[in-house]
Image (cartoon, rainbow, N blue to C red):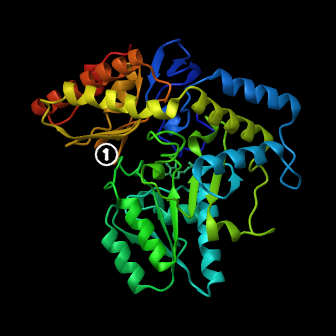
Amino acid sequence: MTSHIMPTYGRLPVTFERGEGVWLWDEKNNRYLDALSGIAVCNLGHAHPAIHAAICKQSRALLHTSNLYGIAKQERLAVKLAEQSGMDNVFFCNSGAEANEAAIKLARMYGHESGIDKPAIIVMEKSFHGRTLATLSATGNSKVQQGFAPLVEGFIRVPYNDVSEIKLELEQHKNIVAVLVEPIQGEGGVNIPGEDYLNQIRSLCDRHHVLMMLDEIQTGIGRTGEFLAYQHNNIIPDVCTLAKALGNGVPIGACLAHGKAAQLFTAGNHGSTFGGNPLACSAALAVLETLEHENLINSAEQKGNAICSGFTEHLRNNEHIVDIRHKGLMIGIELDKPCAELVKSALQQGLLINVTNEKTIRLLPPLIINDQEINQLVITLTTLIQDYTAHLHTTQTYESQTLYKPA
Ligand SMILES: *Cc1c(COP(=O)(O)O)cnc(C)c1O
């Protein structure tokens, strides 16, 4: 039967029916350990009772009224986000790309208010900011842009984790209004920059009066061991975008602003029909409460350390491992060979993982993962990696089907 879904995704041959915590079950009742959390979305795991209760309760009262009226839950969520981030105000939307669109519009408006007709934003190589026209133009991956020319103009690209290039551009071009950067690149291969990278960008942005805009869509909401990754650096950006884990699976995005950036938008400048509706905001409020209640942000650091020392220990003699790196529960295991096939063989072993940038296994397990589940993750994946790399010595191509039988 031909599918009536546009083939924008190469999907794995599995369909899940239910979940609980870190676990998912398919139609045949096979169980899988989800070490990806729906791409950093279900940080509280699947079917968390607090989220379930919050959205049930809200759906009985009210789902949507639009932003033509006051929305109490939206106000409350904005207060909570401001408290926890140090930012001043929030624009709510429905996805990461939309949050970045809001950030890009803020940056342009900032430029026009200072008399810059053709504002430009510095963006990074290997970055990912979304799939809408402006955000794919900001993205540093030609595959994402292929076929969609003409791109949105006004982006200047520099290498990631290299402040000297940013400095040079800022000195040369007077029309730069912002620097947009991920605190850790997720899609680009779990690239963790130098410890004071963000601090240096903060100083450069201050010196040149441009906005520092952080895309925390993947790194935010406790993933790296702080509520937001920039909190490791004790800085406040001018703009910060969130989505993914903010609603634990209920779509919600947010663009947070601070100081001068918080004063730019006025009535009519931007909008969203669904943005910040009562249902999405009730989910996000429950997420924030649960993170605090279960002390999940502090434990993310310790759990990430446990997982990575497990891998380091078990894989120490494997010469194909280039690097094992992590911040909290954002984890990358880089191999010296392309390893996308590992995703399928892991699936057959009941483990959900991801590979980015061809050679880096990316793990984004739910923050609620426990010690036993951590053990199982480490053992299962180590075995898969050892088999895969051992096989690299004997033949050129690796056929997962012949090595692994479905569980
Ligand atoms: C996922 C992601 C986005 C895009 O979010 P969508 O909700 O898919 O639009 C943008 N930036 C980063 C860093 C992301 O990880």
Q: Please, is residue 206 above or below residue 62 in the view?
A: below
Instruction: Determine the residue positioned at 42% across, 80% down.
Output: 170
Numbered marks: total: 1
Residue 390, x across and y down, in percent: 15, 27
Q: Please, is residue 179 above or below residue 29 in the view?
A: below
Camera sees residue 194: yes
Front-most of 86 and 385?
86
Q: Which residue is mark 1?
A: 358
The residue type indicated by label 1 comes to: Glu
Residue 284, x across and y down, in percent: 67, 38
Front-most of 226 and 177?
226
Instruction: Determine the residue positioned at 51% across, 84% down.
Output: 175
Camera sees residue 147: no
Crowding at mark 1 (Cα within 10 Å: few <14, some 14-19, many 20+)? some
Whether ligand 1 has any atom under 8 Å from the Cβ at mark 1 is answered as no
Front-most of 356 and 214?
214
Q: Secondary structure at mark 1?
A: loop
Residue 12, x across and y down, in percent: 46, 31
Instruction: Determine the residue positioned at 48% across, 42% down.
Output: 226
Quadrant housing the N terminus? top right
Residue 68, x across and y down, in percent: 88, 56
Q: Please, is residue 162 above or below residue 244 in the view?
A: below
Q: Please, is residue 280 above or below residue 168 in the view?
A: above
Image-quadrant location for residue 318 = top left
Image-quadrant location for residue 88 = bottom right
Q: Left of 270 or right of it: where is 199? A: left
Q: Left of 294 or right of it: where is 72? A: right
Quadrant housing the C terminus? top left
